[in-house]
Image (tube, rainbow, N blue to C red):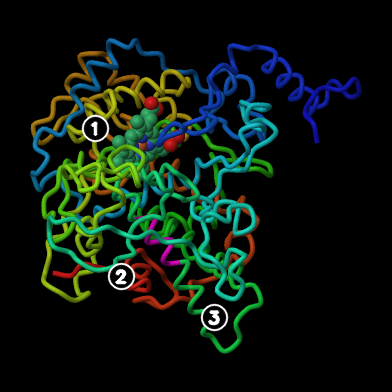
Amino acid sequence: MSLKPTSAAQTSPAAVFAAKVANLEAKPAANANAVKVTPGHGVAGRHATRALLDILSGNKDPGMFGRMFPKLAPLNVPDSKLETLSKAMVDKDPTAETGDNKQIPRGFTFFGQFVDHDVTLDLTSLGDKEKDPLGIENFRTPGVDLDCVYGLGPDGSPHLYARNPANGNKPGPKMLIGKNITVPFGNVVGDFRNDLPRSPEGFALIGDHRNDENLLIAQTHLAFLKFHNKVCDMLSAGANPPADIFREARRIVTWHYQWIVLHDWVERLAGKGTVAKILHDGRKFYRFKKVPFMPVEFSAAAYRLGHSMVRQGYGHNRIFPGTPFQLFFDFSGLSGGIVGDLAPNPPIGQIPVAALPSNGIIDWRRFYALGDSGGAAVPMSPSRKLDTQLAEVLHALPGGGGNLAFRNLKRGVNLGLPSGQDVAKHMRMKDPLTPDEIASDSNGSTDGAICKQLGLHTATPLWYYILKEAKVRHDGLRLGPLGSIIVAEVFVGLIHGDQNSFLWKAKNWKPTLPSAKPGDFTMVDMLRFVNDINPIGD
Ligand code: HEM
């Protein structure tokens, strides 16, 4: 149905909405640069603009983007203040154990980034995006549905699939997996299939190219490709294989993944029982009529919580027991030096390389609590706490990307986000952060004091408020009440609004794949099921 205005029923809510759309579309400035032809992490194909949000938010189904709190006033802060605050938001002691979050293993940081890409992926064709740059009429709803893995399925995206063993002219039900190369360093010799599939020039052939932005999200994506393939094998070997293996495998994988998102990820962030409570009581602040939208309070503030979880460096495997983060950008097709046939032969250094060298394959025991999975004991350092301190590496992003803390704060202002205090008041929080709590500091940080000097402790940028709330209320181990509600309601809503999800189709469904605790399923269970935990050994 078109939203363009018609002469009839000019005063109905639909006509009012349509008139607003027409008015917005008539303003070229609102649409300028709204479609990115080369999206990256945090820069989706289409993105929200303030003009769009100001005009359409408050409508029950605003389109692709909207606001959770459309009636609250925006917090305007000059760049000079944002810059001063962002510079102070640095982790001054990045290896101090006091900054570690022992409740969230560090693998979840990249799972969280993977989930971000899943919910922000916009598979609408470029032509359709250009016709509807603001994502009002023609968009796929944001969903926790693994379209980043499946693309448009074997028919729509055959380049993502392995050939069908029964009919080599057709793509089969299984995902394509890439091959590693061997390099002299580390002596990991053999045929490994532990890279993303790649084009001859090194770009990943996957449903969302952003998942090749750094090696840790790339290996997370690979684990999901292998998860799907393992479920296909399980179904084919069963007594009564389904007629359509792909379809059934996709359903099983997606439902287990949605379970992981809600119960192993969101409940780590928001506290056990949060999801059940929202399902029981209903969503109070993330509301839509039929079509879920991406709320900017989530995408431009709350869910950027992942930035504070990133560590300055990671122990990756036995060959790279302590690797600065920059190297994970280097070993990727999108930000770094994986370039396929364009790589010099013989190699001239660590990068550029044709594909991921086998010595760069992840040892999952170092990222998730897989302790008793065999082999030598290895350290598993956790993620960093949810707080207002970001690793130094994020203060100077590669390729001139600037300071991520500043970019987050600035994005909030550009999109007209309200202050944390106004959101807390609107939500009728019993115990909102006091100005003194906002101004508090710990572990040698000074951002709280600076926030006060700038006068931002009484009207605080939402992203900063949510991180400070996590630190003050739960010592950075999980989100505080305001952050929890935004994150948990949005994830529950995105899944609930998807008519193929388990919440829609079978509300009382419980995971069926093997797991440590029957009826539950975690990232650890998934990695154990895939059974490729430390391919290169000790
Ligand atoms: C690995 C290191 C990461 C880097 C270098 C990074 C970098 C970025 C950048 C440059 C942006 C755009 C900033 C802007 O608005 O101008 C962004 C946006 C964003 N990031 Fe990250 N990020 C990282 C990890 C994460 C993680 C772990 C999460 C969540 C768990 C996350 C969630 C988000 C969200 C929600 C956005 C905005 C929404 C969108 O994707 O469109 N990021 N990030």
The residue lying at 22 percent from left, 42 percent from top is: 351
Q: Where is mark 1, residue-wise?
A: 394
Residue 466 location in percent, x, y?
33, 35
Is 328 included in the stretch rendered in magenta? no
Q: Which mark is residue 416?
A: none
Camera-side mark, 1 or 2: 2
Which amino acid is tagged 3? Ser
How many neighbours does mark 1 have within 10 angstroms: few (below 14), some (14-19), or many (20 or more)?
many
Which amino acid is tagged 1? Leu
The residue lying at 10 percent from left, 36 percent from top is: 443
Q: Could you tell me which secondary element the residue under label 3 belongs to?
A: helix
Q: Is residue 56 left or right of residue 76?
A: right
Span colored in magenta: 220-227
Seen from the viewer's position, the closer of residues 39 and 509 is 39
Seen from the viewer's position, the closer of residues 395 and 458 is 395
The residue lying at 43 percent from left, 54 percent from top is: 274
Please state the quadrant of the image where ligand 1 appears: top left
Please report whichever mark, 1 or 2, sits nearer to the chain's N-terminal start: 1
Residue 218 location in percent, x, y?
35, 51
Q: Residue furthest right?
A: 8
Q: Where is mark 2, residue-wise?
A: 532
Can you tell me whether the CB of the residue at mark 1 lies under 8 Å from the nearest atom of ligand 1? yes
Please report whichever mark, 1 or 3, sits nearer to the chain's N-terminal start: 3
Residue 127 visible in the displayed image: yes
